[in-house]
Amino acid sequence: MKFHDPRHEYDRLREQGLTESDAGWVACRHADVVEIAQDPDRFSSAVSRFLQIPNGLDGEEHARMRRLLDPFFAPERMETLEPLLRSVAADLVAEISRGEVINAVTEFGARFAVRAQSQWLGWPSDLEDELLAWMAANFEASRSGELTQTAQVARRFDEIIRSIVEPRLTGSQARHGDVTDELIDVLRNEPDPEATLVSVLRNWTGGDLGSIALCIGVLVHWLAVHPEHQDSFRRLSDHELDQAIDEILRIDDPFVSNRRRATQDTTVDGVEIRAGERVVLNWTGANRDPAVFGDPEAFNPQRNAGQNVVYGTGPHVCPGRPLATLELRVTIQELLKAVSQIRLAADHSSKRARPPAGGFRSVPVVFD
Ligand code: HEM
């Protein structure tokens, strides 16, 4: 069965340059997206009425927060974390029955994302089912576009985070010496430490859970459709595999867009944008721009690495990239180590997620 692929809509929009939509101007061309993302003076990230740290901050306030938070993703930290995440991936792969149809997004990607994140942050493993239920609700809410539903889901998530953070902040619970405790120490002297912590953790976990699950769905789908690469990927070095993964995500980028607001009257690619107007940066469209990548479907990791914007660009470039890269690498390595073949399930079709989400909501596959 043929399914609708929103990437083709972004390909079509890109040919028209900057276009108008209900959400504001939409930029799908690589040059426009990069220009806007790299110019925070003309395009502010303060687009939400909710506190978003660091996503919704600008200027020095943003830079100060990034200085505090970026060290959590430093290379030596990722090195320490690697064996832990590798065993999460290996255990999960071992749990999945061979020869049976599974949905690679929900039963593999989402489960890995939740377990990996709980290990990283030091959260109790019995939160797994609650976090999985939250992810499903969050996915449905963003699909529906219903503001009340979205707000309800956001509240539920804040409650989960508060239940972890509050007892640690007030000292009613012993220290665990984990990443969450370290984050509490770093943010303890902020004007409103609890609100700041909840916002940072929401953006970390929001960035992590959904996007990792979707990325794993895209990667497993691509490997199933390109079986010749399953074997060649087993022989790649870590660095080569990281580049290959980034390139698959460039071709099929599930982290579709972010927003900006013009701070002044300005022009992009000859189009006039007024102060206060909204702009959507469509990373998925930019990553498929033939002006930069030639044939957008052509797999060419080395050639395309320098222009790939899966993790954004400019001052808001993804701080979690080293963690995401590590999580995706160990997942693919452990999967390819444990199975002889990944194949699309016969009589089932993959289903694309609906915008604003990217990637797939369902990738039925069989691990042999
Ligand atoms: C494969 C997974 C991921 C993808 C594709 C991704 C992509 C992105 C992109 C495109 C941006 C730029 C946003 C903008 O310019 O407005 C971004 C920002 C951000 N990401 Fe990620 N991300 C991923 C994983 C993660 C992880 C694992 C974390 C943290 C644990 C994370 C935390 C953040 C945060 C906090 C920001 C905002 C940074 C700022 O505003 O300064 N992301 N991400």
Image (spheres, grey):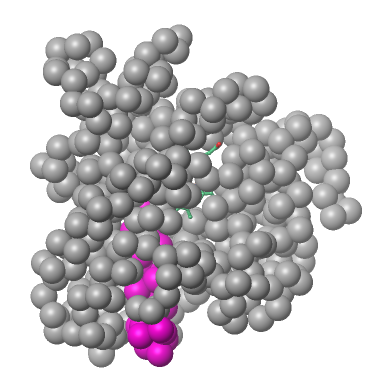
Q: Residue 49's x, y, as percent? A: 52, 27
Looking at the image, residue 366 sits to the left or right of residue 45; the answer is left
Compare residues 22 and 27 and report the one nearer the observer. 27
Camera sees residue 288: no
Q: How many marks?
A: 0
Compare residues 347 and 193 and report the one nearer the observer. 193
Q: Residue 262's x, y, as percent? A: 74, 36
Image quarter hosting the N terminus: bottom left
Magenta stretch: dominant secondary structure? helix
Point 23% across, 85% down: residue: 340
Q: Considering only vertical position in the picture, is 60 above or below 170?
A: below
The question of residue 359 being in magenta is answered with: no
Looking at the image, residue 212 sits to the left or right of residue 41; the answer is left
Q: Considering only vertical position in the picture, is 73 above or below 10?
A: above
Looking at the image, residue 169 sits to the left or right of residue 308; the answer is left
Point 26% across, 85% down: residue: 341
Quadrant of residue 191 within the rendered picture: top left
The question of residue 212 being in magenta is answered with: yes
Where does the magenta region start and end?
210-232
Q: Considering only vertical position in the picture, is 170 above or below 114?
A: above
Point 85% across, 40% down: residue: 266
Q: Residue 225's x, y, as percent? A: 40, 85
Camera sees residue 56: yes
Q: Residue 367's x, y, as percent? A: 21, 80
Point 23% across, 61% down: residue: 89
Quadrant of residue 18 within the rendered picture: bottom right
Image quarter hosting the C terminus: bottom left
